[in-house]
Image: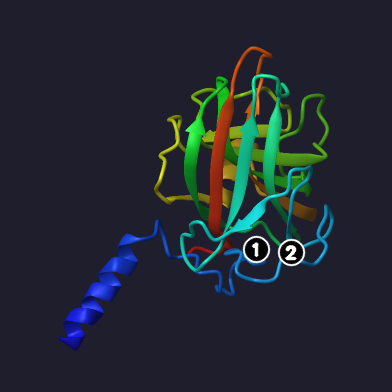
Amino acid sequence: MALLLLFLVVAVAAACGGDDSGDGNNPDDGFANPGFEEDLTRPCVSDTLDCWFALNPPEFIVSDRTANSGVNSALLAMRQTTASREAEIHYLVQEVAPNELPEVISGNYFVENWVKGTDLQYLQFVVIVFGGGDDLAPCPGGGACSNYQIRYLLAGIDREPFGIANAKFVFITDLAPVEGEWIHFERNLRQDFIDLWGGLPSDFTKIRVLFEVRYDGKTPTEGPLEADVFYDDLYMGPPR
């Protein structure tokens, strides 16, 4: 009987999450507090390393509504009417300064209340490396870029939203986001830089990673739009 109960507990636990590989306690993880289970009250802004912040309001919310593992996740709640702005970004950002570019980046997201009110409404995460361009392809004009970006389109759109000289786009999927289910994503960051930028950045000053829900190019007559997007168990480091 005890063995049966143990089996049932394990089976239920396995069925309730998207991917439990990022439990928030991995010493190899380059992100601080990747599962949002620790204290988030200390001040954190751009150039403050190893903590979560938003580049611009609104702030993200630490929520216990759903989690890939543990209790908490980070919620980006987007609410806009037909009178809203042309573009808006809801951010979850951390800046780190490792000695070399991490090999793998991964995480999990969960979407609720996806009301698409404009064509370019989507989820993405962005990796920005500041400096370190000596071994990378030049920016237009022939010189090194001030920063090098890879923008990973997680869901919501099937074309690149805009052109940007120092960024490359990668489609994880070009479909609408799946709702009500934790979705795992993972990329080999080093290989992507080699494939897209021609090499690996070296002697960079920092890496900024942004997890977002956003829209671009909205007209005044479009909308309303809405989305609740949760991120959890974020990881950047060696393969696991």
Q: Name the residue type under label 2.
A: Asp
Choose top left, top right, bottom left or bottom right for residue 140.
top right
Q: Nearer the viewer, residue 142 or 128?
A: 128
Give the secondary structure at mark 1. loop
Identify residue for label 1: 31
Distance from disc 1 to disc 2, alpha carbons, whole Å, reads 6 Å
The answer to whether residue 73 is left or right of residue 46 is left
Q: Name the residue type under label 1.
A: Phe
Give the secondary structure at mark 2. loop
Q: Are marks 1 and 2 in contact (CB under 8 Å)?
A: yes
The label on residue 56 is none
Q: Quadrant of the N terminus?
A: bottom left
How packed is label 2: few (under 14 Cα within 10 Å), some, or many (20 or more)?
some
Choose top left, top right, bottom left or bottom right for residue 12.
bottom left
Q: Is residue 103 visible?
A: yes
The answer to whether residue 179 is left or right of residue 2 is right
Extreme residue toward the bottom, this view: 2
Residue drawn at point x = 46 percent, y = 60 percent: 68
Residue drawn at point x = 55 percent, y = 44 percent: 229
Q: Nearer the viewer, residue 30 or 232?
A: 232
Q: Is residue 213 visible?
A: no
Identify residue for label 2: 50
Q: Nearer the viewer, residue 225 or 20?
A: 225
Can you give x and y, in whole percent of width and height, for residue 26 in the image? 55, 73
Can you give x and y, in whole percent of width and height, for residue 212 in the image? 63, 42
How packed is label 1: few (under 14 Cα within 10 Å), some, or many (20 or more)?
many
- Residue 222 vertical placement versus 197 (above, below): above
Count the numbered circles shown: 2
Residue drawn at point x = 48 percent, y = 43 percent: 111
Can you give x and y, in whole percent of width and height, for residue 112 in the image? 48, 42
